[in-house]
Image (tube, coloured by chain):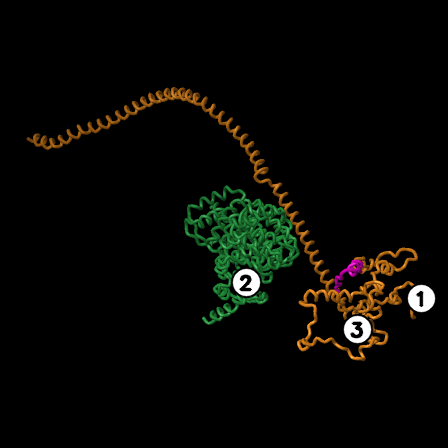
Chain colours: A orange, B green
């Protein structure tokens, strides 16, 4: 029993011991197992890795060769392409150079020629300068002409005034108003007055009537048909050398207007034809040729009886009639009437016109 | 109205006197009617209503020259006031009678008839057509050739009034051979005649290119240029008008004018005139410059720009200033050289645009001129004053120009900074995304970050890196910044930050 009790007490410890020893072994066993597994796995891993490495090496060699082959193929193509592009780029570059040159030329020559433009602008400015100069000259000429005209007008006006005021000229006795004795020199107006010609009052030009007959011939030989030297020859003409007479006198004599004598100038019987004309007009107009008598003398048919004193044979009335002729027409020399003429006294027709001074009153 | 009754009474008193036996009374009555009608439109209306005109027309054919002169005077006096009166004259058949008077021997009658025809045709095209249909034009051309100066003047005036309305009428006048005779008379010393002749040629030339070419073929250049030196203002004005009408049609005609030295003489003429007489000359320069850049350069070298700027600043009248502004705009809008020649006038143009006293037209023309010149202007010192005073719409263009020029020119960049322009640009307020903002950005991009940052302004972050790259790649800028003593401290600070 004691041993049973001892065994029973030990059985619990035996259980634990049995369990513990089994588990210890297990524990170790597990550990050892794990260790063995680890070693084996590691070794297997190395094996596999070596195998894979080997495979890799082989694969790399294959791939290397394959890639080399492919690349060499591609390299051909690439070289061709690169060559081609290189050539094309060269051509392009050359083409660009040509185009650049051409475009520069074209633009400079045709579109915008700078030098031509500069030349043109220079030409325009030169043209402007010339035009400006010409216009300036023109304006100056105009101004000077105007000024000259102005001065001439003033001068002319002053000359006219001087001619009108000629009477204010100073004489020897009396100094004129412009020649005051207190002045050193006479006033310019004084000098102008001295130079001026006095103004002659204008004569109205007489219209010459057109007379018939003799007067017509006289009219055509009148002063107008001969050239008169109204204008003098120019002042600056050189006087001809030699003992010549004064040209004005010569011209006066050469172109002397005709001055007919009294006898020739008027028709001497102008009164008679005028009377006859008048009578002819009246004869045309009159209804009857008889004289109109006043009604108071209508019944008087008596002839007038002159008085004794006025009816003598030798009365003064008959002297005044054309009684110097005989009353018998048979005794007449000619049948025409005597004319009431008297001879012109030729003495005075040459008065003041002869060449010599003989017989003139001094 | 009692005045009207009085008028009617007077007219009805004068009317029977026109039919009087004694010719002197007829003439005096006609003269009296003419003087009455001459005074005002009401009186002319009274004369028309008083049924005088048919009587006058009827007796125009028969009477002696004094009566014809007086009757033509009445017709002229009535017709000059308004188109209705002139229409009344046409309706009573006076035109035929007047044309018959034009064939009369006495120059006084011809003058009176021509003047009456001229006054009638002045108003509108239909009346001119009626005058032309009556056959007046060949007779007027004959009248021009007469020796009396007064008759020539009036005939030239009548032709000018006829041809001013339409091209067909001008063509009729040209077909009658008027141009040759008018061109001959340019040399006449009488000032009023020259004025009428030049205005007639101008009215003919203004309608079309063919007519202008015909006028030019009559060899008026360079004779017309002597008229520009005349003492009389009106002669100068009408000569400028003629040249303007010729030059405005085509570039070839402008070229012809330039080659004849017309631009120089017109410029001198502008200098010697004042006021309204300058206007045609200014417009002529504008038209010539508008055709092409060569012609604009020709205008510039003829010293046209100083003259125009003098006109712009001195003239009191707005329309003359507007014309000068327009002309300057036409000159400056072609290329940068043209703009450079005109830049000194830009401040004046701007001040006129901004001033409240200028008229609408003047402001519009100044604005157009500025907007035309600015896109071509590359001379930056002239543009900088614009940064300070200009309104936004002009500022946009100014900044656009800066943004175009600054990236390429390093000297300009330096000048821009030192003169304080960059600072001003930073101060400008602009809506993000607008054109103005883009320009400001591109200007800022030309400068490195520090320069822009020293001037107080905020920018966007992502652009800093861009600016840095810009600075690093733009060697020129780098060197210039190295040499500029002002920028050295900035550079040193930048290096310090980089070293850290």
Which element is circle 2 on? helix
Can residue B436 be seen here?
Answer: yes
Q: Which residue is mark 3?
A: A168
Q: Which residue is mark 2?
A: B74
Q: CA distance from mark 1 to mark 3?
A: 41 Å
Residue stretch in magenta: A206-223
Question: Which chain is disc 2 placed on?
Answer: B
**Would residue B472 appear left or right of A226 to someone viewing this image?**
left
Coordinates of residue A30 in the picture (x, y in percent) = 22, 27
Residue at the front extreme, as displayed: A302
Q: Which residue is mark 1?
A: A358
**Would residue B179 appear left or right of A256 to someone viewing this image?**
left
Q: Which mark is residue B408?
A: none
Between B331 and A131, the one nearer to me in the picture: A131
Which element is circle 1 on? loop
Q: Quadrant of the N terminus of chain B?
A: bottom left
Q: Where is residue B77, by image quadrant?
A: bottom right
Residue B418, relative to residue A81: is it above or below? below
Q: Residue at x 26, y 25 (%)?
A: A37
Between B220 and B139, the one nearer to me in the picture: B139
Q: CA distance from mark 3 to mark 2?
A: 54 Å
Labels 1, 2: front one: 1
Question: Which chain is disc 3 placed on?
Answer: A
């Amino acid at each position: 029993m004691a041993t049973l009790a001892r065994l029973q007490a030990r059985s619990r410890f035996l259980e634990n011991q049995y369990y513990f020893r089994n588990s210890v072994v297990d524990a170790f066993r597990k550990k050892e197992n794990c260790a063995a597994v680890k070693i084996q796995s590691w070794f297997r891993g190395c094996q596999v890795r070596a195998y894979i490495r080997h495979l890799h090496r082989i694969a790399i060699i294959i791939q290397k060769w394959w890639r080399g082959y492919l690349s060499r193929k591609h390299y051909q193509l690439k070289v061709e392409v690169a060559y081609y592009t290189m050539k094309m780029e060269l051509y392009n570059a050359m083409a660009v150079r040509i185009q650049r040159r051409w475009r520069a030329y074209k633009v400079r020559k045709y579109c915008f020629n700078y030098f031509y433009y500069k030349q043109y602008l220079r030409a325009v400015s030169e043209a402007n300068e010339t035009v400006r100069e010409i216009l300036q000259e023109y304006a100056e000429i105009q101004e000077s002409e105007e000024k000259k005209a102005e001065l001439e007008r003033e001068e002319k006006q002053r000359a006219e005034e001087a001619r009108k005021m000629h009477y204010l000229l100073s004489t020897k006795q009396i100094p004129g108003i412009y020649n005051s004795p207190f002045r050193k020199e006479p006033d310019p107006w004084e000098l102008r007055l001295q130079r001026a010609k006095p103004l002659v009052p204008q004569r109205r030009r007489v219209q010459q009537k057109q007379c018939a007959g003799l007067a017509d011939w006289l009219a055509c030989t009148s002063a107008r048909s001969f050239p008169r030297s109204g204008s003098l020859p120019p002042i600056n003409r050189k006087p001809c050398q030699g003992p010549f007479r004064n040209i004005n006198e010569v011209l006066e004599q050469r172109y002397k207007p005709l001055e007919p004598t009294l006898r020739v100038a008027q028709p001497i019987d102008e009164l008679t034809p005028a009377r006859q004309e008048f009578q002819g007009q009246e004869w045309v107009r009159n209804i009857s040729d008889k004289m109109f008598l006043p009604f108071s003398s209508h019944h008087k048919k008596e002839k007038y009886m002159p008085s004794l004193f006025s009816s003598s044979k030798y009365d003064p009335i008959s002297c005044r009639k054309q009684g110097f002729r005989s009353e018998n027409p048979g005794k007449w020399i000619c049948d025409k009437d005597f004319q009431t003429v008297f001879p012109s006294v030729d003495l005075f027709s040459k008065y003041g016109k002869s060449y010599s001074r003989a017989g003139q009153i001094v | 109205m009692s005045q009207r009754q009085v008028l009617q009474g007077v007219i009805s008193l004068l009317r029977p006197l026109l039919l009087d036996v004694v010719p002197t009374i007829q003439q005096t009555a006609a003269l009296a009617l003419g003087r009455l009608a001459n005074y005002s439109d009401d009186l002319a209306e009274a004369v028309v209503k008083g049924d005088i005109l048919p009587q006058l027309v009827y007796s125009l054919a028969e009477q002696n020259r004094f009566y014809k002169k007086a009757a033509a005077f009445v017709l002229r006096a009535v017709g000059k006031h308004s188109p209705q009166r002139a229409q009344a004259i046409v309706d009573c058949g006076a035109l035929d009678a007047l044309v018959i008077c034009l064939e009369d021997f006495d120059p006084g009658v011809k003058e009176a008839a021509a003047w009456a025809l001229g006054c009638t045709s002045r108003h509108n095209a239909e009346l001119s057509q009626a005058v032309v249909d009556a056959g007046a034009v060949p007779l007027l051309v004959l009248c021009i050739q007469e020796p009396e100066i007064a008759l020539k003047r009036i005939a030239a005036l009548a032709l000018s009034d006829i041809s001013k309305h339409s091209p067909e009428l001008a063509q009729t006048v040209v077909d009658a051979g008027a141009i040759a005779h008018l061109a001959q008379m340019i040399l006449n010393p009488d000032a009023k005649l020259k004025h009428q002749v030049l205005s007639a040629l101008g009215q003919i030339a203004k309608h079309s290119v063919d007519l202008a070419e015909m006028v030019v073929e009559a060899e008026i250049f360079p004779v017309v240029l002597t008229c520009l030196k005349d003492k009389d203002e009106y002669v100068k004005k009408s000569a400028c008008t003629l040249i303007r009408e010729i030059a405005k049609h085509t570039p070839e005609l402008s070229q012809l004018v330039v080659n004849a030295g017309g631009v120089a003489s017109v410029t001198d003429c502008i200098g010697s005139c004042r006021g309204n007489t300058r206007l045609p000359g200014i417009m002529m320069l504008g038209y010539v410059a508008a055709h092409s850049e060569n012609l604009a350069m020709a205008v510039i070298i003829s010293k046209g720009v100083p003259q125009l700027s003098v006109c712009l600043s001195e003239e009191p009248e707005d329309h003359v200033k507007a014309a000068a502004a327009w002309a300057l705009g036409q000159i400056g809008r072609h290329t940068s050289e043209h703009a450079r020649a005109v830049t000194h006038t830009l401040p004046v143009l701007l001040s006129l645009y901004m001033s409240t006293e200028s008229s609408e037209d003047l402001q519009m023309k100044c604005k157009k001129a500025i907007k035309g010149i600015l896109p071509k202007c590359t001379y930056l010192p002239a543009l900088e004053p614009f940064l300070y005073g200009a309104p936004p719409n002009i500022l946009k263009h100014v900044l656009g120009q800066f943004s175009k020029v600054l990236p390429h020119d390093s000297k300009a960049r330096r000048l821009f900074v030192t003169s304080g322009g960059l600072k001003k640009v930073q101060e400008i307020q602009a809506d993000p995304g607008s054109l103005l903002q883009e320009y400001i950005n591109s200007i800022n991009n030309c400068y490195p970050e520090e320069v822009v940052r020293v001037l107080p302004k905020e920018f966007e972050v992502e652009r800093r890196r861009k600016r840095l790259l810009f600075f690093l790649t733009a060697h020129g800028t780098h060197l210039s910044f190295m040499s500029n003593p002002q920028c050295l401290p900035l550079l040193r600070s930048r290096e310090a930050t980089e070293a850290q």
